[in-house]
Amino acid sequence: MAHGPAKGFTRWLYTTNHKDIGSMYLWFSFAMFLLGGVFALVIRAELFEPGLQIVEPGFFNQMTTMHGLVMVFGAVMPAFVGLANWMIPMMVGAPDMALPRMNNWSFWILPFAFAMMVATLFMEGGGPNFGWTFYAPLSTTYAPPSVTFFIFAVHIMGASSIMGSINIIATILNMRAPGMTLMKMPLFVWTWLITAYLLIAVMPVLAGVVTMMLMDIHFGTSFFDAAGGGDPVLFQHVFWFFGHPEVYIMILPAFGIVSAIIPTFARKPLFGYSSMVYATASIAFLSFIVWAHHMFTVGMPIAGELFFMYATMLIAVPTGVKVFNWVTTMFRGAMTFETPMLFSIAFVILFTIGGFSGLMLAIAPADFQYHDTYFVVAHFHYVLVPGAIFSITAGVYYWLPKWCGNMYNETMGKTQFWMAFIGLNLTFFPMHFVGLAGMQRRVPDYNQFFADFNMISSCGAFLFGAAQIMLLYNVISTIRGGKKATDEVWENPEGLEWTVASPAPYHTFSTPPAVK
Amino acid sequence: MLKTTSRLVAWLSVPTLLLTSGHVLAEENGRSTVNMPQGVTSTSQDIYGLHMDIFWWCVGIGVVVFGVMFYSMIVHRKANGAKAANFHESTMLEIVWTVVPFLILILMAWPATKSLVKLYDTSESDVDIVITGYQWFWKYEYLDQGVSFFSRLSTPEEQIRNQAPKGDNYLLEVDEPLLIPTNKKVRFLVTSNDVIHSWWVPDLAVKRDAIPGYVNESWTYVNEPGTFRGVCAELCGKDHGFMPVVVKAVEEGEYNTWLADRRAQAEKEKELANKTFTFDELMVQGEQVYGKACAACHGANGEGGVGKAIAGSPIATGDLSGHLDIVINGSQVNPAMAAFRETLSEVDTAAVITYQRNAFGNSTGDAVQPIDILKFKQGN
Ligand code: HEC
Ligand code: HEM
Ligand SMILES: [Cu+2]
Ligand SMILES: [Cu+2]
C-alpha cells in the first residue's frame, strides 16, 4: 500500500494527499503575497513624495483595493489553510484529511478565482477601485463594469474557504488518534477548529452581500441604492458582520503557531493551556458582536455606539490573557533564538502594539478622529503583518525541516528576520504619526506636512519586500539540499509531528499512534 | 532631485535616532507632526484627553509586559546557562490578569461614555448648515438663509503634477471656505448626492459620514476666529484625495455681513439668468467653466478620457436638446457623467454648452442663452 506520489503534473492536479495539497496552498499563497506586495510597492512608490508621479488616482485606487483583497484572501487565508493541511493530520495522528477529494477541489478553484480577479485590471474601466471593503454605492451604481467578475471571484473564494473549513472540522472531530482528547490537542489544532467555525458562519454572509450587489447592478433591485428606497448603511452592517470575524480568522491560527513555537525554544511547557483555549473561544464569540466599531461615524444611535464600544473594549481582555500566557511561558525558561523563535517573539511584541492601537480605536469618541486615517492603516498592519505574516513565516521555518528533511540556513534566516523586522517598523510605525496628524487613508497625494514620514514608510516597504525574496531563496535552497534534519529537528519539541521521520513520509500514521 | 536625495540619505542614516530625536517631536506651524491636534473646541479637547489617557494606559501596560519579556530574554537564555523551570499553570495569575485589565477598561469607559453623550447632543443650535457631498466637492447650504454654494479644491493642477512649487496649503485649500460665526452653536446636517463621503475637520473633531438617503447630525462651537482645514475621509472614487474642507470661523458681525453679501449675490445671479449674452461672452465664460468642471474627464482639448470626446461628438454637434439633456440630467447609462442641474448655474450651463458646440473644431454656431436652460429645466 505504501505507494509514493504519482509522477509529473498530474500528481498535483489529481492529488488527494494532504501534504501535496498543503504545499500547493503554501506556494499559491506565497505567489499571491508577492503579487500583493508588488501592488503595495506601487502604492508606496507613489506616496514616496507629495504630488502625482507614477500612477493616476484612478489606478491608485485599484492598487489599494487589489492589494487589500489579494493579501487578505490570497496570501493570508490560503497560507493558514496550507499549514492546516500539512500539520493538522500529523498533529492529531490522522492518516490524511477527512475529505481528501474535496480538499483537492477547494484548492484548485482558488487559482481560477484569483486569475479572474486580477484579470479585471486589464478590463475596460479597470479593476475594483472601491477599497477592499467595497462600500456600496461606490461598488454598485458607481463601479466599473468589471465588478461582476470581482463578485464571481469572491463567490469562488468563499466556496473554497467553506469547503476547506468543513474538511478541517471533520478531520479534527473524527480523525484524532485514540487518546487524543480535545483538551490534549495542540493549540494550533484548537485555534483552527474555532477558526473553521468562524469561516462557516461568516463566508455565507459575504456571499450574501456580494449577491445583493449583483442584484442591484444587474437585476434592478435597490438593496443599497437610496434613490430606490435602499440603504447604503445596511451594506456596511452586513459587510462588517463578515469582516470583523474575518480579521480574527486571520489571527487565531497565528496564535496557535506561536503557542507551538515559544514553548519549544523556551524549553518549558506552554503556560495556561486551558486558559488559552477558553480565551480563543471567547474571542471568537465576541468577534460576532463588535462589527459596528468599524462604523462609529455612520451616525448610529448613541445606544448602538455605546454597545459596540463596550463590546470591543471587552475583546482586549481575552487577547491580553494570551499575551500574558506567552510571556509567562518565556519567563524562567532556557531560551534560544533560532529564526522561528525570533519571528514568534516579534509576533508577541508587535501584535501587542497593534492591540494597543486597537484598544485606542475602540474608544468611540476618539475613533471619530482616528477613523479612516493612516492611524488605522498602521493599526491593522501591526496586527496583520507581524500577526499573520510573521507567524506564517515562523511556522514555515519551524516545520520546513520536517517537510523536506533539510535544515534551512540559520544565518540567512536571521538576516531575513532582521530585515523584515526593521523594514516593517520603518514602514508602519510612522503611519501612526501621519494618521494622528491628519492624513486620511486611500489617497494618492498629500500635503508636504506629511512628507518626511511617508518617505520613511516607502523606504521601509522596499526593505520589507527584499526580505521576502530572501525567504523565497532560503526555502528553495533548503528544499534542494542542506544539512539533514533529525526526526525531532529541535530539542524536545512537543507534538506527534516530531515522532515521524524527516522528511515526513508521503503517508503518515496509516496506523494510529498511541497518545499517552 | 538633489533635495530629495539628500533628504532621503538624511532620513535613512539615522532611522532609530530619529524616532526619539527632537526634530520629530517638534511642531510645525504650531501643529504636531506626530500627534492628534488638540483642536479648538471643547469636544476636540475632550477627545484629545481621552486619546492621551488611553495612550498612557497602553504605555504603562506595555512597560510591564515588555519589561518582563525582555528580562526573561536577557536573563533566562540557555546561553547564560539558564535551566528551564517546569511550571505551567496558575489559576490565581489567570484571574489577576483577567480582572485587572477589566478594571482599567471600566476606568476608560466612563469618560468615553460622557464625551460620546456630549458629542451626540445636537440640540439647540444657533446656525444650521446642510453639507452635501458630491464627487468630488462639497455643497454648503445655510438653512433658511437663502445662501448656498459649492466648495472645491483650489490647488492648481500644475502643483499636483509637480510643474509648479507646492503652496503651504497644498490640497488643503478651496475656492470658497465654509464660514461659521464664533461663539455660536453650529449644527451640521451631513448628507450626500452620490456615494459615501465623510466630512472631517480635525481641529473641530467633527467627522461625519455623508451618506445618500441619510442626514447625519453633528455640531461645533468655536470660540476664537481661525481657519481650520480638513478632508474627505471616506473613499469616494477617483478624486477622493482632492476634496478638502476649509472652515473659517469669524466674529458674528463679519459673519452677518458676509451672509448678506452672499444673499445679494444670489439675487444677482438669478437676474443674470434673464439676461441675453453675446456669443463671445458665452465662449469666454464657457471656456472657464469647461476647464473647471468638465476637462478632468473630457480632456483639455475635448479629446475625451473618462468621458467621451467632445470634439466631433454626435451630441455636441447634433440636436441641441440632446446636448442640454445630457448636461442637465446626466447620462442614463454612465453615472460618471453626472447631472449638472444643480451644480452649475443657468449662466454657466449656457456658457459651457455654447463652448462645447463651438470649440475643439465643433462649429454649430449655436449661442445658448441662460433662459433656454431655465426653460429646459422647467420643461423636464
Ligand atoms: C466625472 C467625469 C465627467 C465629467 C466631470 C463630465 N463628464 Fe461629460 N461625460 C462623461 C462620460 C463618462 C460620458 C459618456 C456618457 C455616456 O456614455 O452616456 C460623458 C458624456 C458627455 C457628453 C456626451 C458626449 C457624447 O458624444 O456622447 C457631453 C455633451 C458631456 N458629457 C458634457 C459634459 C459637460 C458640459 C461637462 C462639464 C460641465 C461634463 N460633461 C463633465 C464624464 C464626465
Ligand atoms: C509589504 C508589506 C506591505 C506594505 C508596504 C503595505 C502597504 C499598504 C498601504 C500603504 C496601504 C494603504 C493604502 C491606502 O490607504 O492608501 C495598505 C492597505 C491595506 N493593506 Fe497593506 N501593506 C503590506 C502588507 C499587507 C499585508 C500582509 C496585508 C494582509 C494580511 C495587508 C492588508 C491590507 C489591507 C486590508 C489594506 C486596506 C486596503 C484598503 O484600503 O481597501 N497589507 N497596505
Ligand atoms: Cu472589527
Ligand atoms: Cu472621499
Image: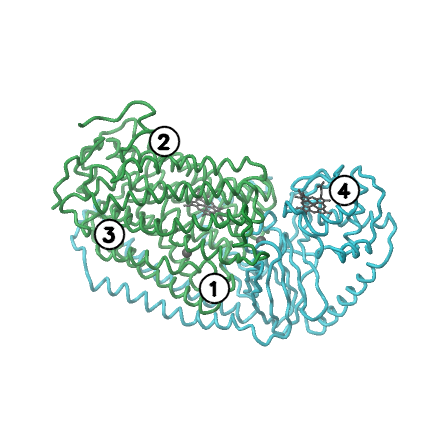
Amino acid type at image mark 1: Ala
Give the SS element for disc 2: helix
Q: Nearer the viewer, mark 3 or mark 4?
A: 4
Q: Are the numbered discs 4 and 1 placed on the same chain, yes or no?
A: no
Give the SS element for disc 1: helix
Q: Are marks 4 and 2 in contact (CB under 8 Å)?
A: no
Q: How busy is the neighbourhood of tag 4: few (under 14 within 10 Å), some, or many (20 plus)?
A: many
Residue named by callout 2: A473
Q: Are marks 3 and 4 in contact (CB under 8 Å)?
A: no
The residue at the far bottom in this view is B124
Q: Mark 1 or mark 2, which is nearer the start of the sequence?
A: 1
Q: CA distance from mark 2 to mark 3?
A: 31 Å
Tell me the green chain: A
Residue named by callout 1: A366
Give the SS element for disc 4: helix
Q: Are the numbered discs 2 and 1 placed on the same chain, yes or no?
A: yes
Amino acid type at image mark 4: Ala
Amino acid type at image mark 3: Met
Residue named by callout 3: A330
